[in-house]
């Protein structure tokens, strides 16, 4: 009985599923079914997209975006993310990668070459706001100090370059002036900066000393004329008219006093006059220090004698190994080259940070 019931069930199942198998075997019916399924799927997908768009628009139109933005600001989410990127070095790598990209360079060039960008820059520069901002920046003490330092550094470089050229030409002139006299005296030639074999110090020749002496003479005349003008004004105010002999005597005494104070004072204290400082030469004694007041007076007196002898007292400089003139031989002094000063710093201690 059980076997009979099983056969009846199998036969019923085959009878029921026989039409479905036949439809599946038919390609035409299968294509229709598949196309119907695709149409249903497409229709369902379109309706789903439409509903998603409507839901998105409804969400964005509501207060949710403002709430999210306010929460991001209050919780400092952006700051934390940026700080993490900076600490990890990822931001630097991202910026470096973007800058090194060829497309970024091309984009920047295209933007810079754009007529609209150029016109915008011109409008920004010519706007009253730009002029006001520039004026404010120029008035700031830091900017003014920076400008002053830049101008001072530029003038110093120009002046140093000119002085270096003059000093170099004067030192080359030392060797040229000595070449013939040393050959006549059967002494070996030497360069303008060669040091003496005895002391190992570069001694200054006539090419470096005479221009400095001329500068000192000009400075002395300026000081003397100013002094004479002041004395003449005082005499005129006092309504006193001295005789010509007394006036000549006072003028000669004043000139001698100014010469004595000028040369003796500079030699004894600084070891060089303004003219010697300009040519970068220095007067020293046997101890490589500036000569004292007594030795400076003695050298001044010998210098006047050397000048009175038609400057013959300066000729020993051309052949002497230490380039000493008559006044140097009498006072025991020498004139040496001074090394070039160190360059001035561009910025001051209180310069712009």
Image (cartoon, rainbow, N blue to C red):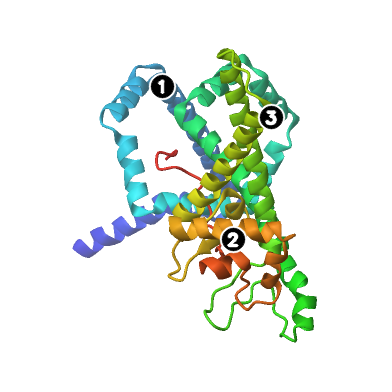
Residue at image location 46% in from the left, 32% down from the top: 142
Q: Sequence-wise, which precedes: disc 1 or disc 2?
A: 1
Please tell me whether mark 1 or mark 3 is closer to you in this view: 3
Asked whether, in this view, residue 37 is left or right of residue 73, the answer is: right
Q: Sequence-wise, which precedes: disc 1 or disc 3?
A: 1
Is the residue 272 above or below the residue 188 in the image?
above
**Helix, strand, or loop for circle 2?**
helix
CA distance for labels 1 and 3: 34 Å
Residue at image location 31% in from the left, 22% down from the top: 67
CA distance for labels 1 and 2: 104 Å
User: Of residues 330 and 191, which is closer to you in this image?
Assistant: 330
Tag shown at residue 302: 2
Image spot of residue 219 (x, y percent): 63, 42
Image spot of residue 86 (x, y percent): 36, 48
Residue at image location 75% in from the left, 83% down from the top: 185
Q: Sequence-wise, which precedes: disc 3 or disc 2?
A: 3
Image spot of residue 133 (x, y percent): 54, 21
> What quarter of the picture does the N terminus occupy?
bottom left
Tag shown at residue 117: 3
Asked whether, in this view, residue 182 is left or right of residue 11, the answer is: right
**Helix, strand, or loop for circle 3?**
helix
User: Of residues 8 and 207, which is closer to you in this image?
Assistant: 207
Please tell me whether mark 1 or mark 2 is closer to you in this view: 2
Image spot of residue 73 (x, y percent): 31, 28
Q: Are marks 1 and 2 in contact (CB under 8 Å)?
A: no
Is the residue 131 above or below the residue 214 in the image?
above
Please tell me whether mark 3 or mark 2 is closer to you in this view: 2
Is the residue 194 above or below the residue 242 in the image?
below
Q: Quadrant of residue 223?
A: top right
Residue 240 visible in this rendered orientation of the protein: yes
- Residue at numbered disc 1: 60
């Amino acid at each position: 009985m059980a076997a009979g019931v099983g056969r009846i069930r199998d036969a019923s199942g085959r009878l029921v599923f026989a039409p479905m198998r036949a439809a599946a075997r038919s390609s035409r019916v299968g294509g229709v079914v598949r196309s119907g399924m695709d149409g249903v799927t497409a229709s369902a997908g379109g309706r789903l997209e439409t509903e998603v768009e409507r839901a998105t628009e409804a969400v964005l139109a509501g207060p949710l975006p403002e709430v999210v933005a306010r929460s991001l600001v209050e919780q400092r989410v952006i700051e934390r993310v940026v700080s993490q990127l900076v600490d990890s070095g990822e931001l630097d790598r991202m910026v470096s990668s973007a800058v090194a990209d060829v497309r970024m360079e091309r984009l920047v060039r295209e933007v810079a070459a754009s007529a609209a960008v150029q016109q915008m820059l011109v409008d920004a520069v010519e706007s009253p706001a730009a002029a006001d901002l520039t004026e404010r920046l120029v008035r700031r003490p830091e900017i003014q100090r920076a400008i002053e330092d830049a101008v001072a550094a530029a003038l110093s470089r120009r002046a140093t370059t000119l002085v270096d050229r003059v000093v170099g030409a004067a030192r080359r002139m030392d060797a040229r002036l000595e070449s013939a006299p040393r050959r006549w005296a059967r002494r070996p030639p030497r360069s303008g900066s060669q040091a003496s074999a005895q002391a190992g110090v570069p001694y200054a020749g006539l090419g470096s000393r005479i221009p400095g002496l001329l500068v000192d003479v000009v400075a002395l005349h300026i000081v003397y004329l100013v002094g004479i003008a002041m004395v003449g004004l005082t005499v005129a105010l006092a309504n006193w008219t001295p005789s010509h002999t007394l006036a000549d005597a006072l003028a000669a005494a004043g000139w001698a006093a100014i010469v004595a104070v000028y040369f003796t004072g500079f030699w004894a204290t600084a070891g060089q006059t303004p003219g010697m400082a300009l040519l970068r030469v220095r007067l020293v004694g046997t101890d490589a220090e500036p000569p004292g007041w007594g030795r400076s007076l003695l050298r001044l007196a010998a210098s006047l004698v050397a000048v009175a002898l038609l400057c013959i007292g300066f000729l020993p400089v051309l052949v002497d190994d230490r380039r000493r003139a008559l006044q140097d031989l009498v006072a025991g002094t020498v004139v040496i080259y001074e090394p070039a000063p160190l360059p001035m710093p561009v910025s001051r201690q209180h310069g712009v940070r």
